[in-house]
Amino acid sequence: MTVVPSPNPVASPHVARTLGLIGVGLGVAAGLVQLVAGSTIPEWSGNKTDNAALGLTTVILSLVAAAGLWHLRHNPVRWQRIGALLLVIACAGVCFTTVGRLWYLPGPVIIAAAVLTFATTPSPVTAGPRASTGPTARASVGAGGWLLYAVAVAVGLGLAVGTLFTVLLGTYASSVAVAAAVAVVAGLTLSVGVAPALRRSALAMLAGGLGAGLMAGGLVLGTSALLIAMG
């Protein structure tokens, strides 16, 4: 596979990279402000009752968005880049509900950086027959790799569902819903972004399994949030 750069008259990769750094930095800052002083500026922080959890969530999602932007710049595989683009946009979208007006600047900047990065990164052009790496990689996993995958799924599921009892205690439907979104986004990051980029099959199975477990846990959390909201 040969990567052939295509010129873009609207923007350059340097502009997209700069926007990404600015957006992520502002996003982390917004999360820290919510975490430390959200209760003192309710008109700016969305008038939340659980500022610490939502501030920490915003910081985590900003860093996940940073990982997605990095993946957009360095991975030429189109379907993985589309997944990373959707991941970054999802992170930015969720944070509009976590820190209120504090996200009005970093959110659009991160989304713009994602779109520009996707548009200015060279697209792959396949030259000659495709490399048959998929079947070989799957064949090299073996029973041990699938056992590792199953363990990682259980760990991811436990981490996600455990937040109901250890951090959020299942009290607020909004908090559980945010936790569900974080689990799903983190799971997508590991499954779509990290696992395919790992060359060692054991590490790829570990990341993929953990991602699948987190996504499954996110669905459980989402269902729990709906049940709490319904009383």
Image: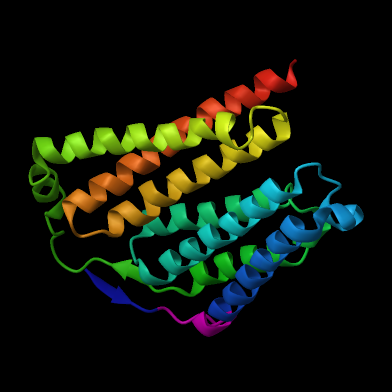
Q: Position of residue 128 (x, y in %)?
A: 14, 66
Residue 150, position as x, y percentages in the image: 26, 33
Q: Residue 59 appears at what percent x and percent y?
A: 62, 59
**Magenta segment boundaries in residue numbering:** 6-15
Up-down relation of residue 128 to residue 214 (above or below): below
Q: Which residue is at the front of the view, 76 or 29?
A: 29
Q: Would residue 109 appear left or right of 43 to someone viewing this image?
A: left
What is the chief secondary structure element of the magenta stretch? loop
Q: Nearer the viewer, residue 142 or 13?
A: 142
Quadrant assignment for the C terminus: top right
Of all residues, the one furthest to the right in this rendering is 43
How many numbered discs? Answer: 0
Q: Is residue 204 left or right of residue 158?
A: left
> Which residue shows up at 59% across the image and 70% down it?
113
Q: Is residue 176 visible?
A: yes
Instruction: Determine which quarter of the picture holds residue 126.
Output: bottom left
Image point 39% across, 55% down: which residue? 193
Query: Can the viewer see residue 108 in this picture?
Result: no
Magenta span contains residue 180: no
Please give the name of the residue rendered at 61% of the width and 68% of the height, measured from the top-left corner.
24
Q: How is the image coloured?
A: rainbow
> Percent x, y for residue 107?
69, 61
